[in-house]
Amino acid sequence: MAAEPSNYVEAIRAGAGAPNALASSFAGRETTWGQLLDRAGRIAAGLRDRGVAEGDRVAVLSANSDRVMELYLAVAWAGAVIAPLNPRWSAEENRFAIADCTPRLIVIGDGIGPETLALRAQPGLTERCIWAASGAAPSGWPDYETLVAAAAMAPAVREGGDLFGIFYTGGTTGRSKGVMLSHAGLINNCRAIRASGILPPGCRGLVVAPMFHLAAGAIMSAIMLAGGEAVILSAFSPPATLDAIEQRRVTDALLVPTMIQMLLDDPGFDASRLAGLQRIIYGASPITEATLDRAMAAAPHVDFRQAYGMTEVSCAATILGPEFHRGEHRAAGRHRSAGQAITGTEVMIAGPDDEPMAMGGVGEVLIRGPGLMLGYWNQPELTAEALRGGWMHTGDGGRMDELGLVYIVDRIKDMIVTGVENVYSGEVESALARHPAVAQCAVIGVPDERWGERVHAVIALRPGAEVTPDEVLAHCRALIAGYKCPKSVDLRREPLPLSAAGKVLKHELRAPYWEGRERNVA
């Protein structure tokens, strides 16, 4: 039996649905599999006509759309490397990413603020931009549809180990990291996700999480591997999401717990609207008991799965199956775990020496498998540190039980998970420190009923300085994305507590907020 293809394009073509079957639906526009494959081949040729060579980067700066899905396929078809950028980032953050990955072309879609769009005025950028947004293209900008005018090309020959994409994540030092993923890494992770029992052939999968995040990109890719229909929404809103689930007869949905809670709370929610839904996979944070109970009562026919992972392992590392959400496993508290390792992936709980901990011991969660990243773009020292011994060091503290279930209990690295987004404290602190009134600052995650965690800033003011929380937030918004900005601010006149080495004792700042909880993360 021939091995399954590890090249992204060949894998998708092998799993494609019938030519007249729907591959995607978005904003009233339906695209069949025949149309998707034809357009991808033409866009790939159009990219080549505009100077994109094998290995070149093509940046995509857009809110969710079927064109982003098309570009995942077309950029790989051309033999190039996709670099999805975040339209919610500030202009400064996107300027850094563009300078870092040096894309040959930048595809600009909808959802871009005027400040970020002004990046096109930078020398050398205008001639590299393609307009894929609604409305007429700015003067001198080629329109995305002009790419389709090219005659289709044969897919470039790429090996499984070749670079597929660069996916930017935050960094503890304030510098974003470009995670390099291979064709085989992403494809094999998507196959393992499907092997857990979701996205069967011919599924209709909801894509509502931001597509510049790998989680949504991986789910979208897994839908394509299944020859299914990607039901794409430009952004999450409870009414639009409920409409899509009901009207498009969605079978599978990736939702974060905050989204599930907001759907249940929406005035237009009716359990009958979920009648066709069969599976929900949720991630980013564990679901609360109350939200899980409400969701399972509203849709008892739906199987719930939790996924845990990170961009650096091509998305998922563990999945908690539906059986652990019910019955004796639930009674034993196993629904609070992050699940068991997916097919082909290993998870180890390690001590400070990177040696395995005894069963039940708390240590750092390490991951290795076919989805392991190639490294961080242009950051070899950080790559070597993260991949010591061939294992991805996640920065999450956890334990493992006798069933191989992984329980996340804390974060070793300075990261906050708020809703669907990961926020690194270092990035926020770097922005805060640039305010003239700030003498010291620390950013921590504190519990939040809606978002799981919220970004909270503790600031020691300079002697005689005056500033309001609103002024602090306005300062941050000019430098970093809005979702990274503190949602609450504690202004102090006294210095922050320091260790003997001069580091802020964040555990002391966090302690009052997490008191009485069984774990220190949401």
Image (tube, grey):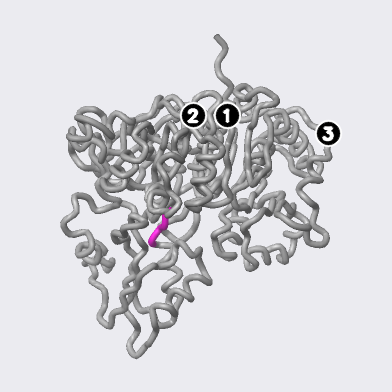
* 463 magenta-colored: no
Look at label 3 and name its amino acid: Ala
Measuring from the top left, give residue 466's x and y in whole percent.
38, 87
Measuring from the top left, give residue 463's x and y in whole percent.
32, 88
Whichever of callouts 2 and 3 sits on the residue coming sooner in the sequence is 3
Q: Residue at x 41, y 46 (%)?
A: 256
Q: Residue at x 35, y 61 (%)?
A: 454
Which residue is at the front of the view, 321 or 493? 321
In contact (CB < 8 Å): disc 2 and disc 1: yes
14 relative position to 330: left or right = right
Q: Quadrant of the N terminus?
A: top right
Measuring from the top left, give residue 406's x and y in whole percent.
27, 36
283 relative position to 20: left or right = left
Which residue is at the front of the view, 198 or 105? 198
Look at label 2 and name its amino acid: Leu
Element type at mark 1: loop
Whichever of callouts 2 and 1 sits on the residue coming sooner in the sequence is 2
Where does label 3 land, which residue?
Answer: 151
Range drawn in magenta: 421-425
360 relative position to 422: left or right = left
